[in-house]
Amino acid sequence: MDVLAAALRWLTSPENYAGPSGISTRLVEHVQISVQPLLLAALVAIPVGMWIGHRRRFEFLVISLGNIGRALPSFGILAIFFVLTFSWPGDLGYWAIFFAMFFLAIPPILTNTYVGIKGVDPDTVEAARGMGLGERDVLLRLELPLAVPLIIAGMRTAAVQVVATATLGAVTSWGGLGRFIVDGFAVQDNVQILGGAILVALLAIVTEMAFGRLQRALAPRVSSEGRRAGGAGEEVSERAAQGVPV
């Protein structure tokens, strides 16, 4: 309890928020290295998932990629990219953690996008085609809006994973909140270690809550059961991420 009390004092001490190694700076670095690869992963995975879900092609590839993404150790991926990007320009370790987080975020976003598009009622799709809508309009005006909750659920899963795993960036000499944990271990400062861990946990919780609210806000209200669509979508997304048929 003494360590926890000391960690709380460390977190609330104004001097720990100032300077290039302060909490404010490390928080900005952590958000930066989380948001950038997440956005790039979304730009890549969402269009690919939409195309696969609409065309019903390469479905096995999506499930396999999701399974492989869960099986690969994040630290191993980080180590590989650290070796490959060691001589690249810029801050040491930045590109390693960037690409590691990018590949970590791809599987849940791709899988959920594919499942969301594919899960649209086939009769509704055929009715839209019968009304004269082209394939592009069917995808963008019908399937995509109905799939949005599942897509956001995939980004929600990816975002929490990235925020938590980006802590490893400190191992490759990058900054972020993980810097407090790594530096704390180096000098055997348990207060700093616990403080850094609390900060990472709080950021992950805030990320989870923010995407949860976004998912509920974007869920289509098409019936009296509309509010329950988000919960059902999360269950389907979890089954899809595990390779279970939906």
Image (cartoon, rainbow, N blue to C red):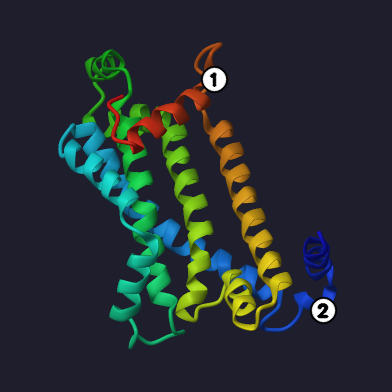
Residue 66 is tagged as none
Secondary structure of the residue carrying numbered label 2: helix
Say if 235 sits above or below 44 in the image.
above
Say if 215 sits above or below 24 in the image.
above
Q: Residue 165 or 59: which is nearer the viewer?
A: 165
List x then y, in percent, for residue 240. 33, 33
Tell me the CA gap for discs 2 and 1. 46 Å
List x then y, in percent, for residue 23. 70, 72
The tag earlier along the polypeptide, 2 or 1, is 2
Q: Residue at x 66, y 70 (%)?
A: 193
Residue 15 is tagged as 2
Secondary structure of the residue carrying numbered label 1: helix
Kind of residue sitting beneath label 2? Glu
Give the residue at mark 1: 228
Q: Residue 98 or 143: which is nearer the viewer?
A: 98
List x then y, in percent, for residue 94. 44, 77
Q: Residue at x 63, y 55 (%)?
A: 201
